[in-house]
Amino acid sequence: MSYIEKIKEIKRSIINRQKNNWRHGSKYKLEGQIKNKEILLFILAGYKEYLWEDVFLRIKQSQLPNMEICVGSSGKYSERLSKICKDNNWCYLSTSLNNMCVLTNIILRDFSKASFYFKLDEDIYIPKDYFKKMIDAYNIVEQTEKKHVIGYLCPNLPLGFYSLYDYLVEKNSLNDFESRFGKLYVGGQLVNPYFRNDIGIDTYIWNKIGIFDDEAQRYFEKGFSYSICPTRTGIAAILFRRSFWDRIGCLKRPRGVGWGEEGDESQIVSFCAKNYLANFRIDNILVGHFAFGGAEHNVLKLKQEHPEFFKIHF
């Protein structure tokens, strides 16, 4: 290597180090001990306290022996989350900067020894044995797929931009839905402009689901199946291997809180599309999303009227 090439290499190294520091750049506090177990679940939480009792109980009931859990709060510290994590022997990581991409980068950097990573948002209801079922599903897809390299796996999420259409077809409710809300396409607000309007979609779907655990069990008993996702999916509940994250390196740090077109979801999905990694939905593993942003008050009212829909039944 020539002298000039060495200088260029040093400059590239400095620039990459600066970028890496910027992308992880936030003061943060980690409570609890990193155990370096085979599976990590990281939960992004801190803003929907009214769901923690439900969501964390389900997680605790399905936690695997070889799994450790880290709850992460972006831009805040919660005394209650700290206590929940201490009581359950989980880790709690909070950042001073409110940026989802930076928080995710820090968690994935500090918990670097796992082979599998589950990511969950704090408003996701999981069914019985969710983590075991998803790991088993990943192994089957990995052994079965000869054509595609896996990016990540996601469960079936009825109240989600990707799976809503298929769920309504399965429930023979697509025509009824469209007569109430308008023509439905697979996808988000660009193709379904009314999605972010407070018009009752969330409560409509939860009324179709009914008792979540019964519906999830009914889906699981249909038998294992999966499908490749040809469009963007949500990342509120995903599973991926460490090798996937190592390919990404880390997320870029966008302005703001790390949502939207430059946020964590958009970056992860775009990376898969640009690098020919396929994402798969496990069709018979159902999870529940509490509500689209801004419609939580409607579903909270439904929860008061029908607590059995959300109560744990296993």
Image (cartoon, grey):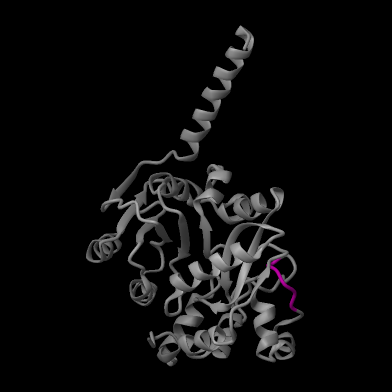
Residue 176 location in percent, x, y?
Answer: 71, 91
Above or below: residue 223 compared with residue 253: below
Determine the residue positioned at 63% across, 77% down.
225
Residue 60 showing in the rendered view: yes
Pick the quarter of the image with the N terminus. Answer: top right
- In magenta stretch: residue 178: no
Residue 188 lies in quadrant:
bottom right
Q: How many marks?
A: 0
Residue 85 location in percent, x, y?
Answer: 28, 62
- In magenta stretch: residue 186: yes
The part of the chain drawn in magenta is 184-189
Residue 252 location in percent, x, y?
Answer: 56, 42
Above or below: residue 253 compared with residue 213: above
Residue 77 showing in the rendered view: no
Residue 138 location in percent, x, y?
Answer: 55, 65
Determine the residue positioned at 46% across, 50% down.
104
Q: 253 or 3, which lies in front?
A: 3
Q: 195 or 290, which lies in front?
A: 290
Q: 282 or 91, which lies in front?
A: 282
**Relative horizontal placement of residue 76, taking residue 32 as reference (left or right):** right
Determine the residue positioned at 54% across, 18% down.
10
Above or below: residue 74 compared with residue 136: above
Residue 199 lies in quadrant:
bottom right
Q: 227 or 286, which lies in front?
A: 227
